[in-house]
């Protein structure tokens, strides 16, 4: 059967953990966008590091980062928060579905991963980097693993149930 952790295969635990942590990170990003909008701020760095802009002399790295960060208006911040929240919910649903062995959760993860693979391939072609290639390989492994789980469960569902009294 393989190595188990928390009563589940380690690969399942790792997939679910990644989805839960990603969902939490996206939720935090959505919350940050809402706070920025509520405070009428367009600069996330000013909210995260308020004292850095009043130092004399100002920190060169903070000024450089601030100069290169995009500035967002209130409407864009709202759309960013909504998009991040929707994505966080999708990832949470995937984690739930994989953990509780629900077919729709596995199918959702398969669809999402398949939709993101072309984006990762284009990113690798544009910026030949080891991290992009590693991300692609990990996502392909996750995809193969979850497809196997889904197919195994689908085959088990399609087999007729034979009651002990019906055995020849």
Image (cartoon, helix red, strand yellow):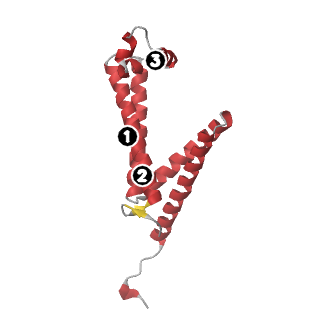
**What residue is at 59 percent from the left and 40 percent from the top?**
131
Indicate the secondary structure of the residue bearing disc 3: helix
**What residue is at 39 percent from the left and 87 percent from the top?**
166
* Residue lying farthest to the bottom in this orientation: 168
Label 3 vs label 2, nearer the camera: 3
Q: Earlier in the sequence, mark 1 or mark 3?
A: 1
**Is residue 158 positioned above or below 36 on the image?**
below
Q: Which residue is mark 2?
A: 16
> Nearest the camera: 124 or 87?
124
Q: Which residue is mark 3?
A: 62
Q: Which residue is mark 1?
A: 24
Image quarter of the C terminus: bottom left
Disc 1 residue crowd, few under 14, some 14–19, many 20+, Cα 10 Å: some
Q: CA distance from mark 1 to mark 2?
A: 12 Å
Instruction: Tell me, yes or no, whether the two marked residues, 3 and 2, touch with CB atoms within 8 Å.
Output: no
Indicate the secondary structure of the residue bearing disc 2: helix
**What residue is at 42 percent from the left and 56 percent from the top?**
13
Indicate the secondary structure of the residue bearing disc 1: helix
Q: Earlier in the sequence, mark 1 or mark 2?
A: 2
Residue 107 visible from this viewpoint:
yes
């Amino acid at each position: 059967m393989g190595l188990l952790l928390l009563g589940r295969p380690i690969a399942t635990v790792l997939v679910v953990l990644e989805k839960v942590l990603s969902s939490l990170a996206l939720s935090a990003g959505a919350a940050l966008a809402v706070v920025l909008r509520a405070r009428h701020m367009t600069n996330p760095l000013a909210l995260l590091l308020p004292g850095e802009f009043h130092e004399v002399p100002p920190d060169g790295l903070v000024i450089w980062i601030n100069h290169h960060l995009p500035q967002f208006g209130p409407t864009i911040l709202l759309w960013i928060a909504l998009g991040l929240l929707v994505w966080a919910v999708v990832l949470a649903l995937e984690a739930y579905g994989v953990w509780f062995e629900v077919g729709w959760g596995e199918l959702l993860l398969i669809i999402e991963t398949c939709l993101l693979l072309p984006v990762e391939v284009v990113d690798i072609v544009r910026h030949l980097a080891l991290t992009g290639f590693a991300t692609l390989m990990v996502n392909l492994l996750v995809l193969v693993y979850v497809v196997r789980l889904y197919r195994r469960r689908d085959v088990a569902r399609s087999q007729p149930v034979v009651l002990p009294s019906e055995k020849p």
